[in-house]
Image: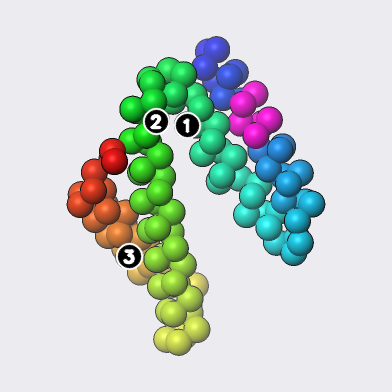
Amino acid sequence: MSEYILRFIAGGAIVSVFSILGDMLRPKSFAGLLGAAPSVALATLGIAVVQHGPAYAAADSWTMIYGAIALACYSVVVCHLLIRLHFAALPATVVALVAWLAVAFGLLAIFGGAA
């Protein structure tokens, strides 16, 4: 139970710091970018270091990087499907999800979870 309380407090504090930072930047669209994913990732990595050690957190961080690269590929595929091929939103996201999974698991298979 204490792990959940620690995650709640650490996550909330880091989200708050990133939200304040995002609110100070221009354009305001950065606020949404900085509000969730980076702060949750930092909280998760901090807890991983405390509970499992730096080697585990390093492997965790590499899988987060692979997921970010896969998300960028997913976004490019969705944009192309929506704009160039005029797909509807649901089919475009479902097709792009296959691309996300292929890139994410491909990177994990090629490079593994640790440096």
Q: Which secondary structure, mark 3?
A: helix
Give the label on residue 99, or none: 3
Q: Is residue 91 above or below residue 42?
A: below
Residue type indicated by callout 1:
Leu
C-alpha separation, residue under disc 1 versus residue under disc 3: 26 Å
Q: Residues within 10 Å of mark 3 (few under 14, many from 20)?
A: some
Q: Which secondary structure, mark 2?
A: helix
Residue type indicated by callout 3:
Ala
Residue where numbered disc 1 is placed: 45
Is residue 44 left or right of 9 when viewed as pictured? left
Q: Is residue 44 above or below residue 65?
A: above
Q: Earlier in the sequence, mark 2 or mark 3?
A: 2
C-alpha separation, residue under disc 1 versus residue under disc 2: 6 Å
In the rendered structure, which segment of residues is drawn in magenta? 9-14
* Farthest right residue in view: 24
Q: Residues within 10 Å of mark 2 (few under 14, many from 20)?
A: many
Q: Residues within 10 Å of mark 1 (few under 14, many from 20)?
A: many
The image position of residue 71, as x and y in percent, is 43, 59
Q: Are marks 2 and 3 in contact (CB under 8 Å)?
A: no
